[in-house]
Image (cartoon, rainbow, N blue to C red):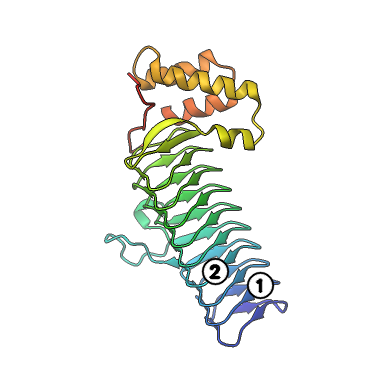
Amino acid sequence: MAIHGTAVIHPSAVIDDGAEIGPDCHIGPFCVVGEEVTLHRGVTLKSHTVVTGWTEIGEESTIWPFATVGEVPQDLKFRGERTRLQVGARCRIREGATLNTGTEGGGGITRVGDDCLIMTGAHVGHDSIIGDRVILVNNVAIAGHCHIGDDVIIGGLSGVHQWVRIGKGAIIGAVTMVTNDVIPYGLVQAPRGELDGLNLVGLKRRGVTRAEITQLRAAYQMLAQGEGNFHDRAARLVEDFDSAAVREISEFILAASDRSFLTPKGAK
């Protein structure tokens, strides 16, 4: 056990031998910290939190009561192999959230980026990769092997099917089931997850220029109505538009995937 001298630990907390507790950490009443856990500088565990498994929590992250972080995967193929969970800096993991470690068959690691907000009751499944500044609203369920890009927002009570990719800057409306890949900056809503435009509000909030947004809107229209099939139209985007964001959409669509895509309404 390595506990930094500046860490503050409530007497009722249980810290297993082997855990590493960094400087300025605060561990509240009735918390449990496992033997392979590393808490970096300034991590706060509110009361009744469990951090277990081979888990690393980045600096200045906070975990609220009754969250369980680093438990074994909910996967019948899991046989006790040693796999990891890595949570980035300044994350906020709210009450009752659950984050599982990876599986040997899925790469062995579940990863959450920096500055994420994982709200009450949300779940991050095994081997999922979550980008930076992602918001998972109350009771969102991310299945195993998902890839969620930077700056994604997923509305409350929504679910993401295993192996789905959600591109950078996309937004998923509340009470939505996402079963196929979502392009970067896409807007998805309706119970069965329909691609219904671009996340224009999010683009404007991040300071994307009007010229860039105009190109994105034209590219989206081309994906919906252009010549050829969806992949053909995606390949032509980089020829027809001089835009880094449009290039991201094209590369995302043309990359390898285990799922098909949500396509624009009315797409041919």
Disc 1 on helix, strand or loop? loop
> Total marks drawn?
2
From the viewer's perspective, is residue 53 above or below residue 134? Answer: below
Q: Where does the image place residue 9, in percent across and percent down from the top left?
A: 63, 81
For the question of whether residue 45 can be seen, the reply is yes
Q: Where does the image place residue 60, in percent across and percent down from the top left?
A: 66, 63
Residue positioned 32% across, 40% down in the render: 192
**Neighbour tally class for label 1: few under 14, some 14-19, many 20 plus, Cα within 10 Å:** many
Sequence-first tag of 2 and 1: 1
57 sits left or right of 144 in the view: right
Using the image, tell me which numbered label, if any, was put on residue 243.
none
Residue positioned 52% across, 43% down in the render: 152
Q: Are marks 2 and 1 in contact (CB under 8 Å)?
A: no
Most extreme residue toward the right, as rendered? 6
Using the image, tell me which numbered label, if any, was put on residue 64.
2
Residue 59 location, quadrant: bottom right
Question: What amino acid is found at the position of numbered circle 1 in the picture?
Answer: Cys
For the question of whether residue 255 can be seen, the reply is no
Residue 204 location, quadrant: top right
Residue 180 or residue 1, whichever sits in front = 180
Q: Where, quadrant-wise, is the C terminus in this rendering?
A: top left
Q: Where, quadrant-wise, is the N terminus in this rendering?
A: bottom right
Using the image, tell me which numbered label, if any, was put on residue 25.
1
